[in-house]
Structures are given as structure tokens and as C-alpha cells.
Image (cartoon, rainbow, N blue to C red):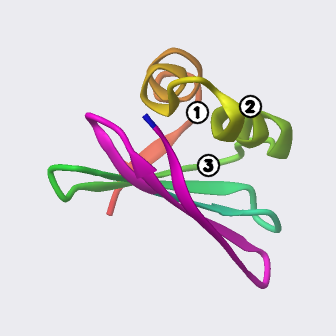
Amino acid sequence: MAITKEEIRGTKIINEIKSSNIKGAVYDTQDKTLLIEFNNGSIYQYSDVPHQEYTKFRIAKSQGTFFSNEISKKYKYRKL
């Protein structure tokens, strides 16, 4: 479980993730939204995620575990 690719486009940080549950993530540093794409194809947008929380997600030993414990239930979200 790890980030396999990272790209920065303007205010967005785009990550490909090798995880049993998460395929990728896009964090917008300007509006503090975090898009999570799951391996099953669903995409969720999480609002008002602080940059430091996203940084912790990026460097976590397991992005899936960090996401489940620290992001998924703490931030407002909507399915896209």
C-alpha cells in the first residue's frame, strides 16, 4: 500500500495509490477538497480537509487505514 505516482497540476495534487481499497486521490490546495477514487470505481469528494491532514494521509504507512480512521467519518462528503 503506497503512493505509486504523484503529479501536481496547478492547485491540485494527484496521486495514484496501490491499496486494497483506494485507487487514487486528488487534493485541491485552494478549496481544500479531497477526491478519493475507490477500486470499485466510486468517487467521493470530502470537503474542508486541511492540507496538513492530507499530508498525513500521503505519508501514512497505509493510506487506506489512515483514510478509514482519520478522514472518512470526520469530513463532510458527497458521492460524485
Residue at x 39%, y 50% (from the top left corner): 78
Residue at x 79%, y 76% (from the top left corner): 11
Residue bearing mark 1: 75
The tag earlier along the polypeptide, 3 or 2, is 3
Q: Is residue 36 visible?
A: no
Coordinates of residue 7 in the picture (x, y in percent): 65, 74
Coordinates of residue 15 in the picture (x, y in percent): 55, 60
Q: Residues within 10 Å of mark 2 (few under 14, many from 20)?
A: some
Instruction: Give the residue furthest to the left.
Output: 40
Q: Is residue 47 visible?
A: yes
Residue 43, above or below 65? below
Q: Give the numbered dot on residue 47.
A: 3
Q: Is residue 74 left or right of residue 68?
A: right
Q: Is residue 58 left or right of residue 77?
A: right
Amino acid type, residue under disc 2 in the picture: Lys
Q: Give the numbered dot on residue 10.
A: none
Type of secondary structure dominating the magenta stretch: strand
Residue bearing mark 2: 56
Which corner quadrant of the image does residue 79 belong to? bottom left
Q: Residues within 10 Å of mark 1 (few under 14, many from 20)?
A: some
